[in-house]
């Protein structure tokens, strides 16, 4: 009955959506002070509602027009243009020129660019994955990702630049790169990092990396954030200190606990058990995305879903790695939990696109497809 009344909504993966909403709720509970009015909590509650509406609308659209080359090229040009405009019109916040101030909210185009890159690479490799042995396809696809990564790095936003590279590298691996080309990519990556260290990194970025290698050398300077984060995670122990009783975050010892260090703040209040449940929710999200991807109607839909999973996993691994002291601090959000409207809406739109693709996947019965498109 429900399927006949709402044929398009019927193809939404409600388990995936439910896990995503619970992750948003975990972030909201963590950033709420439970004492006074909380700016981050109130704003994020609004962004969460907007993101859900965007998800529903995205799931209702037939996204097969994204297979067209001219559409993908237009998206890439617009995304690149937005990144370039940042250097002239972007607002400088904490030393980074990475967002537009539109009055009632700040728009960070980097989040949209990541989604566009996934679509672009899905389109590129959907036609050329059988020819991935040819080095030119690695070079061309790498040039797309490298161009976007450089523009983002110059903001400077090293964390997002790394995510862009991770998306490209993950999709190239799954497209079937040869062993010799893989070694070549790793060599070039090492060379690029060496050049960045010599000519690209700002002094504070170098100091963060040096502090990561020698964490006890500058606890009151460059190493302060990382140290407080590891203290917060460790102090949660098994069961946590309780909701609202995280001393590291609520007493402001842990900076940016609503965004860059929200995992540490969550771990302090919920402990090892809570973190385990959190990872289970993220695991559900990734598995359901991959399950939807494997039923894609064409290689484009399959590669889009896989790229989306890589996008989420990259953010999760890097954010958690930073919060537990395994990676240098780069200022990276974690999906669904961290404060911010741009990334939250982008994440739910990305899932909505996947649900829209799911409606015409190979798992859909032909008769259901016929009835749906005839409006029966």
Image: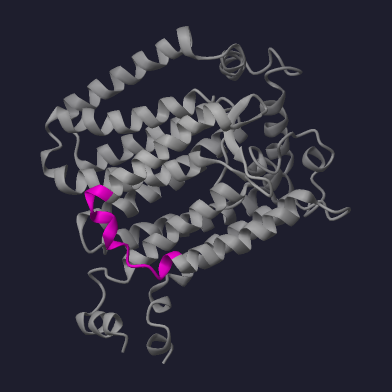
Task: Tell me what residue is drawn at x 55 percent, y 27 percent.
Answer: 88
**Residue 143 sits above or below residue 58 on the image:** above
Q: Position of residue 96 (x, y in %)?
A: 60, 27
- Between residue 205 and residue 151, name the one nearer to us: 151
Q: Quadrant of the N terminus?
A: bottom left
Q: Is residue 278 left or right of residue 267?
A: left
Q: Is residue 372 magenta?
A: no
Q: Quadrant of the C terminus?
A: bottom left
- Residues drawn in magenta: 58-70
Is residue 3 visible to us here? yes
**Residue 336 sits above or below residue 361 on the image:** above
Q: Is residue 60 magenta?
A: yes
Q: Residue extending furthest top? A: 198
- The image quadrant that residue 325 belongs to is top right
Q: Position of residue 285 (x, y in %)?
A: 46, 58
Task: Tell me what residue is drawn at x 53 percent, y 58 percent.
Answer: 281
Q: Position of residue 142 (x, y in %)?
A: 28, 30
Is residue 240 visible to us here? no
- Between residue 232 and residue 140, name the one nearer to us: 140
**Residue 284 sits above or below residue 99 on the image:** below
Task: Tell me what residue is drawn at x 26 percent, y 68 percent.
Answer: 361
């Amino acid at each position: 009955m429900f399927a006949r009344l709402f044929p398009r909504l019927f193809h939404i993966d409600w388990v995936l959506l439910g896990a995503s909403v619970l992750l948003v709720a975990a972030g909201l509970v963590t950033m709420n002070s439970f004492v006074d009015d909380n700016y981050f909590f109130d704003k994020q509650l609004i962004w969460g509602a907007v993101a859900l509406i965007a998800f529903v609308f995205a799931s209702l659209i037939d996204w097969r027009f994204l297979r067209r080359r001219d559409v993908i090229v237009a998206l890439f040009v617009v995304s690149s243009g937005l990144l370039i405009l940042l250097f002239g019109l972007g607002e400088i916040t904490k030393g980074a020129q990475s967002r537009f101030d539109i009055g009632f909210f700040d728009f960070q185009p980097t989040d949209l660019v990541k989604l566009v890159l996934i679509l672009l690479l899905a389109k590129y490799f959907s036609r050329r994955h059988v020819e991935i042995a040819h080095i030119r396809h690695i070079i061309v696809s790498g040039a797309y990702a490298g161009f976007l990564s450089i523009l983002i790095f110059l903001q400077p936003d090293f964390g997002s630049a790394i995510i862009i590279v991770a998306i490209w590298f993950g999709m190239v691996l799954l497209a079937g790169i040869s062993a010799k080309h893989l070694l070549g990519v790793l060599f070039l990556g090492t060379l690029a990092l060496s050049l960045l260290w010599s000519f690209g990194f700002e002094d504070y970025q170098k100091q963060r990396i040096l502090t990561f290698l020698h964490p006890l050398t500058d606890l009151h300077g460059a190493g302060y954030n990382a140290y407080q984060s590891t203290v917060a995670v460790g102090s949660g122990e098994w069961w946590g200190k309780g909701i609202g009783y995280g001393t590291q975050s609520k007493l402001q010892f842990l900076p940016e606990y609503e965004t860059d260090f929200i995992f540490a703040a969550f771990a302090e209040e919920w402990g090892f058990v809570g973190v385990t449940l959190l990872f289970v929710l993220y695991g559900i999200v990734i598995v359901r995305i991959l399950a939807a991807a494997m039923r894609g109607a064409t290689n484009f839909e399959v590669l889009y879903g896989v790229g989306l999973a890589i996008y989420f996993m990259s953010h999760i691994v890097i954010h958690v790695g930073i919060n537990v002291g395994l990676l240098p601090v780069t200022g990276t959000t974690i999906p669904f939990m961290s404060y911010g409207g741009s990334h939250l809406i982008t994440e739910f739109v990305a899932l909505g696109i996947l649900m829209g693709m799911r409606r015409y996947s190979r798992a859909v019965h032909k008769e259901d497809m016929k009835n749906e498109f005839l409006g029966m």
